[in-house]
Image: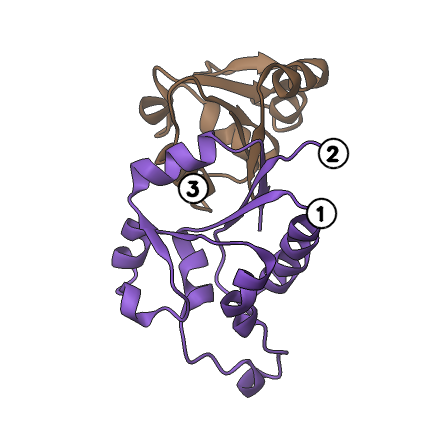
Chain colours: A brown, B purple
Amino acid sequence: MLHIVNKSPYADRALDACLARLTEGAALLLIEDAVVAALADGAYAAKLKGLDVYALGPDLEARGLAAKPLCAQVVDHAGFVDLCVTHPASHSWF
Amino acid sequence: MAHKKILFVARKAPYGQSRAPEMLDALMVAAAFDQQVHLAFLDDGVFQLVKGQSAEAIGHKPFAHAFEELDDYDIEHLWVERESLAERGLSESDLMAAVTLLDRAEMAQAMAEADLVVSA
């Protein structure tokens, strides 16, 4: 299962809700405002540690965060598509 | 068309947005096309099932009664997460329909096993 979150965890509980229900083999993709959770020095780094986490590059770049230390693998839009097709299903936590 | 296991996930309280009635429309369509439809309520979504709602009091069209009629669509299980209820001071007796309580780990497993997850 690919889990997709698009809201900042500092403003919305979607990421926490998702993290509480991840199962073995799941991947997490942070897009739009949720990319703020990918900062390695942020409060969510510890919660994301050990998970298969991705962040959408253009959303990091747009927010000036692409060069910061991250706790997620950066993917572009093609990588987003790859994640969608390599997982049997996706779950958007909007 | 192959039968898919479609899981509708309700995580939002009713009336703030129109997600709940829209989800009901979508899941009835899915069920009408003989898909295997499941419905899960977690986080604030559990408030959608509270009995005694009066949508008219705030000028909304009532929809909650539809949850009691899902049997007619062969939607047998309304899955409700036990922890979400407890965190909000609710219990099974506050809910209108016969539900199946799942703990958080069981809910996570149910979501992982779906072919298609629709967030509502």
- Picture coordinates of residue A81 (x, y %)? 69, 18
Q: Could you tell me how far apart the alpha carbons at marks 3 and 1 are, in whole angstroms?
A: 40 Å
> Residue placed at 40% from the left, 18% from the top?
A40
Q: Is residue B1 left or right of residue B20?
A: right
The answer to whether the residues at label 2 and label 1 have Cβ atoms under 8 Å apart is yes
Q: Amino acid at mark 2?
A: Met
> Residue placed at 54% from the left, 87% from the top?
B57
Q: Amino acid at mark 3?
A: Tyr
Q: Could you tell me how far apart the alpha carbons at marks 2 and 1 are, in whole angstroms?
A: 9 Å
Name above or below for residue B114 compared with residue A11.
Answer: above
Are labels 2 and 1 assigned to the same chain?
A: yes
Q: Which mark is residue B33?
A: 1
Which of the pair A47/B77 is nearer the observer? B77
> Residue placed at 57% from the left, 19% from the top?
A87
- Picture coordinates of residue A12 (x, y %)? 46, 46
> Residue placed at 61% from the left, 17% from the top?
A83
Name above or below for residue B92 compared with residue B114.
Answer: below
The residue that disc 3 covers is: A10
Kindly indicate the quadrant of the structure image that contains residue A74: top right
Q: Secondary structure at mark 1?
A: loop
- Picture coordinates of residue B75 (x, y %)? 53, 54
Q: Secondary structure at mark 3?
A: loop
Chain designation of label 2: B
In the image, farthest residue toward the bottom = B57
Q: Earlier in the sequence, mark 2 or mark 1?
A: 2
Q: Which mark is residue A81?
A: none
Chain designation of label 3: A
Kindly indicate the quadrant of the structure image that contains residue A33: top right
Q: Nearer the viewer, mark 3 or mark 1?
A: 1
Q: Amino acid at mark 1?
A: Phe
The residue that disc 2 covers is: B1
